Image (spheres, helix red, strand yellow):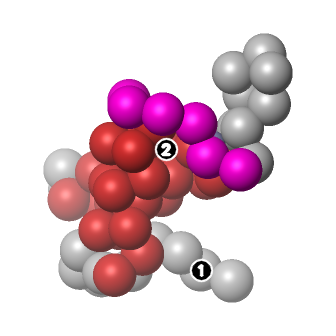
């Protein structure tokens, strides 16, 4: 599954929303130690998109 699209896709917009959401509160996937699968994936999606745009 290739999540790095050619343009800011819905997945990228959702990733931005997920990161913003975690600045306010925790989701149902957040662990007591602060780690979160959703937040980690969102960060990877945004990073992949930024790397693509910088070229
Ligand atoms: Zn979370």
Residue sitting farthest toward the right: 32
Q: Residues within 10 Å of mark 2 (few under 14, many from 20)?
A: some
Residue sitting farthest toward the left: 54
> Which residue is at 32% across, 54% downward?
16
User: In the depicted view, which residue is nearer to us: 9 or 39?
Assistant: 39
**Of helix, strand and loop, which mostly describes the magenta segment?**
loop
Label 1: state its secondary structure.
loop
Image quarter in which the N terminus is found: bottom right
> Which residue is at 38% across, 29% downward?
23
Label 2: state its secondary structure.
helix
The mark that comes first in sequence, 1 or 2, is 1
The segment highlighted magenta reads 23-28
Q: Is residue 10 left or right of 22 when viewed as pictured? A: left
Q: Residues within 10 Å of mark 1 (few under 14, many from 20)?
A: few
**Residue 44 shows in this picture:** no
User: In the depicted view, which residue is nearer to us: 34 or 43?
Assistant: 34
Q: Position of residue 42 (x, y in %)?
A: 51, 52
Q: How many marks?
A: 2
> Which residue is at 34% across, 56% downward?
17
Image quarter in which the C terminus is found: bottom left
Q: Position of residue 51 (x, y in %)?
A: 33, 50
The residue where tag 2 is placed is 43
Is 3 a magenta residue?
no
Q: Quadrant of residue 2?
A: bottom right
The residue where tag 1 is placed is 2
Q: Is residue 31 left or right of 47 when viewed as pictured? A: right
Comparing labels 1 and 2, the label whose residue is closer to the camera: 2
């Amino acid at each position: 599954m290739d999540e790095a699209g050619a343009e800011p896709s819905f997945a990228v917009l959702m990733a931005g929303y997920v990161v913003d959401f975690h600045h306010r509160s925790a989701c149902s996937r957040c662990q007591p130690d602060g780690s979160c699968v959703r937040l980690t994936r969102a960060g990877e999606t945004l990073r992949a998109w930024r790397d693509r745009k910088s070229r």
